[in-house]
Amino acid sequence: MEARPNGYVSVLENELVEMLKGAVLPEMSRTSEQCIYKVPQIIRQANPQAYTPQIISIGPFHNPRGSISANNNLHEMEELKLNYLKGFLNRTKLCVDDLVLKVQKLENKIRNCYAGLVCFDSNDFLKIIVVDACFIIELFLRYACYPDWKEKDPILSKQWLHNDIKRDLILLENQLPFFVLEEIYKLANINLEVPSFVTITIWYFHRLNQQNINSERLCPKHFTDLLRTFLLPPSFDFAKEMENAGYAIQHVYSASQLSEAGLKFELSESKCLLDLKFDRGVLQMPCFHVHDSTEMHMRNIIAFEGCHISNYDSAYVSQYLSILDFLINTEKDVSILVNKKIISNWMGDANAVATMVNKLCKNVPMPKLNSKYLSLCNRLNGFYENPRNKYKAIFVHEYFNTPCKIASTVTALFLLLFTLIQAVCSIWSLLK
């Protein structure tokens, strides 16, 4: 190897020392506070729009001040957010100084919640937090008094705009820490018949709260986490069953294969989407409502679980969707579940549902299943692989899989029956 002069080594050494001045060792406290993430590129590329705000930016990651490439819609909404801030100040009789002082005290804690580069100095960062937080609180308060605002509010009076904003408020990269919203709400001391900010938040997202979970003991980290909480089992006993670690599973037979083997699908009375039960050849599943926003909701929950939950055995929603991915391969599988009312298909096209489910877990690490789900999958496979059920499935698939096969099989059976009757009659006439 060619020798380098001492001067060259000294220059290189100085450059490395200078580079290291900007490096920071990870702190355990900061890491534990992180809850708002940029979606990893390998996951994002499957459907970038599912993670990117289209109408309004919340927090620093997509704020138009920090990105020259931000779309025009995000820039236009900045003025509207200021109007809401003014409305909030008029409502609460607070002044800007009150808000700034409150948020300044929380700045480090807020920054620690973001697991990514926040390229704003203190002043700009605090402006973003104050404006966005007050916008959200004022919007939620107006929604809580919807009849008074539905004709005059610039958002509530336009259903399409309100729907688009509600969509953006759920995105993982588009979040504020929930404690910031609560602190400002408490500071405002608003005289309403509302005990807490989490209560009006649940009111705002009530259409996504299929289990009617109330605000007791809810401590969401942000709105994406709240949406995930709406799907989790409220029963402590059931949640405890889901905690024990299992293993990743490579295969489960599809709904059509299991149906051909004689398995029955039934709609469960449970409102918890994750509450799957299998007993005596019957798989009970709660209703899964599939609409245009379902993919976006589920993708952001999966991304949050993948980024935030170090013990991936607790990634319950990802585990449920991985089982659903096994059960659904084609539109025939979807049709079986739709006919049993296990899937409520608001998209209309069964093939679109199958495609959506199959793509949800693309590029996402296969989660380890908790013991409850692992046992269920093994029993489903065991049911199909039982020789009696397996040969029944093969027979049904070969001879009764399509209308043409059914028609040809029935015709063949009738021909066989007529031939048998003719043979019996011939033998009978000979004997007689």
Image: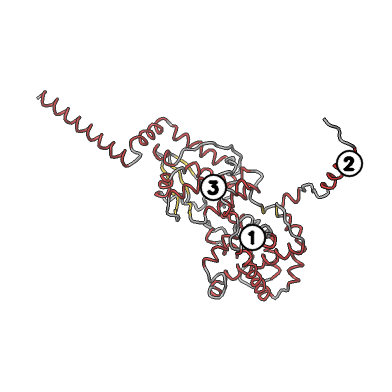
Picture coordinates of residue 330, whole percent (x, y)? 44, 44
Residue 180 relative to residue 24: left or right: left
Picture coordinates of residue 19, whole percent (x, y)? 82, 47
SS type, badge 1: loop
Q: Residue at x 44, y 42 (%)?
A: 255
* Amino acid carrying mark 1 in the image: Ala
- Pointer 1: what residue? 70
Give the Cα separation between the discs numbered 1 and 2.
43 Å
* Quarter holding residue 62: bottom right
Tally the numbered discs: 3
- Pointer 3: what residue? 360
Q: Nearer the viewer, mark 2 or mark 3?
A: 2
Q: Nearer the viewer, mark 1 or mark 2?
A: 2
SS type, badge 2: helix
Give the Cα separation between the discs numbered 3 and 1.
26 Å
Q: Report the quarter where the N terminus lies.
A: top right
Q: Is residue 410 above or below residue 233?
A: above
Mark 2 or mark 1, which is nearer the start of the sequence?
A: 2
Q: Nearer the viewer, mark 3 or mark 1?
A: 1
Front-lying residue, 259 or 286 = 259
**Which label belongs to residue 10?**
2
* Amino acid carrying mark 2 in the image: Ser
Mark 3 or mark 2, which is nearer the start of the sequence?
A: 2
Q: Is residue 116 above or below residue 132?
A: above
Q: Is residue 178 visible?
A: no
Give the Cα separation between the discs numbered 2 and 3.
52 Å
